[in-house]
Amino acid sequence: MKNVKVWLAILALTTVCSGNIWSQNRPKAPRKAMSPEQRIEMRVERMQRHLMLDDKTAAQFAPVYKEYLQALEDCKPQKPETKPAAMDDKQIEEHLTAQFERQQKLLDTRKEYYNKFKKMLTMRQVQMVLQSDRPHPMMPKNKQMKDKPQGPCCLQQNACVFD
């Protein structure tokens, strides 16, 4: 009986000590940085799967969608040289004017490609394509920060002073 207790104690001790060996994290394999062309190609393939296009339509869709994604990239804002807090009135005015021009260019681009997409896709598919360029299209709508109070004082739902 005494011998069994000793063996159980040794077994428990080795189990506890060897648990740390198994719980160590293995280093993850480093991911390759994707080039912008690879990212665009992956987005095209993902959109084709999402829209469930046949081969003929997919062949028409891919080059137009690549052009569309490249046009959207061209509409992205450039990082300002100075922080907004350090800008004077003239710089702020130039920044806002450039922002309005980018927004107008984005709207014109979306209208132009809407006309191209509607020639080859159904309206529901066109809607899916045009909604895919939202900031986070895969994020569920209930998780987005729309209509939620923001700011440091908004910890409680009804206690926001910004309302």
Image (cartoon, helix red, strand yellow):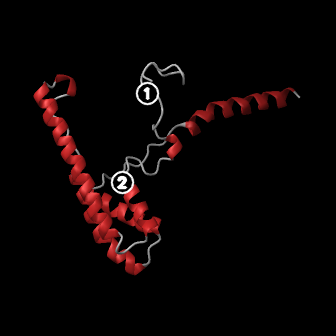
Q: Which residue position is annotated with label 1?
A: 150
Mark 1 and mark 2 in contact (Cβ < 8 Å)? no
Amino acid under disc 1: Gln
Residue 74's x, y, as percent?
20, 53
Which residue is depicted at the point 41% across and 79% down? 55
Taking the image as shown, residue 54 lies to the left or right of residue 66, namely right
Which residue is depicted at the point 43% across and 68% down? 123
Q: Quadrant of the N terminus?
A: top right
Dot 1: what SS?
loop
Residue 107's x, y, as percent?
27, 54
Q: Quadrant of the C terminus?
A: top left
Alpha carbon distance from label 2 to label 1: 24 Å
Figure check: 158 above or below 124: above
Residue 129's x, y, as percent?
39, 61
Figure check: 1 above or below 105: above
- Label 2 Cα crowd, 10 Å radius (few <14 / some 14-19 / many 20+): few
Q: Which residue position is annotated with label 2?
A: 133
> Image quarter for residue 62?
bottom left
Amino acid under disc 2: Asp
